[in-house]
Image: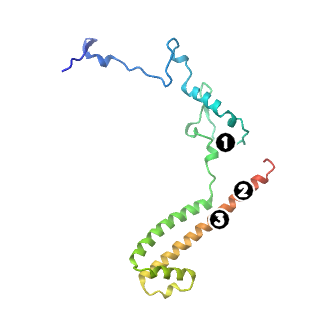
Amino acid sequence: MDQQELEIYDGIVVPASALRQEQRRTRYGNLADLPDEELADPEELERVMYKQMWWPILRLPQQRWECRVRPNMDEDGRLDWGAFGTVDFDSYRPQHSRLRYRIEQLKERLKDQSCLLRMMSDRVPGKTKYKIMRLVRTGVLDIGAIENNEMYFLVAMYLRVWRLRREIEHLREKSREQQEAKVRELWASPGC
């Protein structure tokens, strides 16, 4: 059994390891004859390095953004952005679009309907179901002429899914046209 070093501290016998304190290490080390308070902060060193590395890009002129979020300043003059501290918050926050919202809603419905369609398709055996679905979609066959209930509901579900896909594509095209119109308007403005 190995012997443990014991020391007496305020009249109490304690192991020597409990009296030792771990020395905190700094990220970049320290200098022997300079106190840690006078060393540069690691964040400051990183800032200087990034400024030297990215100065050509930082010198490019940029468009002014009107940002409603104002940072707090601490006593050292550093900016504290809080939750918005990563990047320019306004430039990453997309504008609300009713079309995109509607597309997302329809995609969720399409996902649910497609799952139901797959389950119903498994209930109807054979390959003729695909021919019947195509004939009904093209308008050659009327859905009311189908007598088998399972086939009728399968074709009805298929038509719902097909219409949802068409509506989503239509809305995507409309959204693309709106975005292109905004870009054309931006390039046509005299500020560019």
User: How many numbered badges does the structure rendering display?
Assistant: 3
The label shown at residue 27 is none
Q: Where does the N terminus fall, quadrant-wise? A: top left
Res 82 → quadrant = top right
Which mark is in front, 1 or 3? Answer: 3
Above or below for 162 versus 6: below
Q: Residue at x 69, y 35 (%)?
A: 56
Earlier in the chain: of badge 3 and badge 2, it is: 3
The residue beneath circle 1 is 67
Q: Position of residue 104 (x, y in %)?
A: 55, 61
Outermost residue toward the left in this view: 1
Whether residue 78 is visible here, answered yes or no, is no
Question: Dot 3, crowdedness within 10 Å: few (<14), some or many (≥20)?
Answer: few
Q: What residue is drawn where x is 60% and y is 67%?
A: 169
Label 1 vs 2, first from the N-terminus: 1
Q: Residues within 10 Å of mark 1 (few under 14, many from 20)?
A: few
Q: Nearer the viewer, mark 3 or mark 2?
A: 3
For marks 1 and 3 on the same chain, the one whose residue lies earlier in the sequence: 1
- Of residues 19 and 118, the one drawn nearer to the viewer in this rendering: 118
Question: Residue at (53%, 82%) from the top-left corner?
Answer: 136
Marks 3 and 2 sit apart, C-alpha to C-alpha, by: 14 Å
Q: CA distance from mark 1 to mark 2?
A: 21 Å
Residue 110 can be seen in this image? yes
Q: Nearer the viewer, residue 75 or 168?
A: 168
- Residue ID for mark 3: 173
Secondary structure category for the residue under label 2: helix
Circles 1, 3 touching at the beta carbon (< 8 Å): no
Q: Which residue is mark 2?
A: 182
